[in-house]
Image (cartoon, helix red, strand yellow):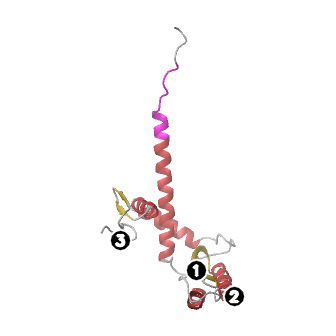
Amino acid sequence: MPTCSHCKSFHLFGKKDALGSFCNDKCLREGKLKAVANTIPPELLQRRIAEIHGGNCPRCSGGGPVDVHTTHEVWSAVVLTSWKSIPALSCKSCGVKRQIGALTFSGFLGWWGFPFGLILTPIQVVRNLVGMLGGPRRDQPSQLLVDTVTRYLAAEFAAQQRATAVNAGAQQYVPPPLPSNAG
């Protein structure tokens, strides 16, 4: 059985590309971004990571360091339970505020489903507490920030490559001559 080149899961049907075999379109896009990311000059990547980490918070415009802070939420209604984790670029203060909000949301709305609400609510609450008390180190960017900036730059590079290809194609296109009215 083939294995997805991105997520490493097994699949019967999928997408094949020069980069490998992928289980779905999302993994194919991620595989292409990873290939583009490998072409980014390391000094450009390191400079951009340092700029973001040492820059102002995109949420409050306060001083950094800026990193990726993740909130964890769960809500339940009788037999339905939904949970998610949401990463966001911010300073520690903004990250903690978001985590307090997610903890409060989950604390009120997470318990109402059986059995998963009763199981997942304490897990998501503890994950928020751990993020609030710990979180990324202040002196160096987290691996999650490095991965996020890498994906962002890869997407920018891919967009530039597509724009360049489109512009090159437009410059090469010569419309056919109009038919003459002589007849």
Q: How many marks?
A: 3
Q: Is 170 part of what is drawn in magenta?
A: yes
Determine whether the residue tagged by mark 3 lies in a helix, strand or loop. loop
* 34 sits left or right of 141 in the view: left
| Residue drawn 59% across the image and 82% down it | 81
Name the quarter where the N terminus is drawn. Answer: bottom left
Q: Position of residue 155 (x, y in %)?
A: 49, 59
Above or below 88: residue 38: above
Mark number for residue 10?
3
Determine whether the residue tagged by mark 1 lies in a helix, strand or loop. strand
Q: Position of residue 158 (x, y in %)?
A: 47, 54
Above or below 97: residue 21: above
Measured in 3D between alpha carbons, the distance from the residue under mark 3 to the one under mark 2, in whole angstroms, is 38 Å
- Can residue 112 be seen in the rendering of this structure? yes
Q: Position of residue 20 (x, y in %)?
A: 33, 61
* 45 sits left or right of 121 in the view: left
Which mark sits nearer the N-terminus, 3 or 2? 3
| Residue drawn 47% across the image and 55% down it | 157
Residues tagged 3 and 2 counted as in contact (Cβ below 8 A): no
Amino acid carrying label 3: it is Phe
Residue lying furthest top: 183
Q: Position of residue 70 (x, y in %)?
A: 57, 79
Mark number for residue 83?
1
| Residue drawn 51% across the image and 57% down it | 156
Measured in 3D between alpha carbons, the distance from the residue under mark 1 to the one under mark 2, in whole angstroms, is 14 Å
Mark 1, other Cα within 10 Å: few <14 / some 14–19 / many ≥20:
some
Amino acid carrying label 1: it is Trp
Determine whether the residue tagged by mark 2 lies in a helix, strand or loop. helix
Q: Quadrant of residue 134?
A: bottom right
Specify start and end residues of the magenta stretch as a single range. Answer: 167-178
Q: Is 69 part of what is drawn in magenta?
A: no
Residue that carries the numbered disc 2 in the rendered image: 108
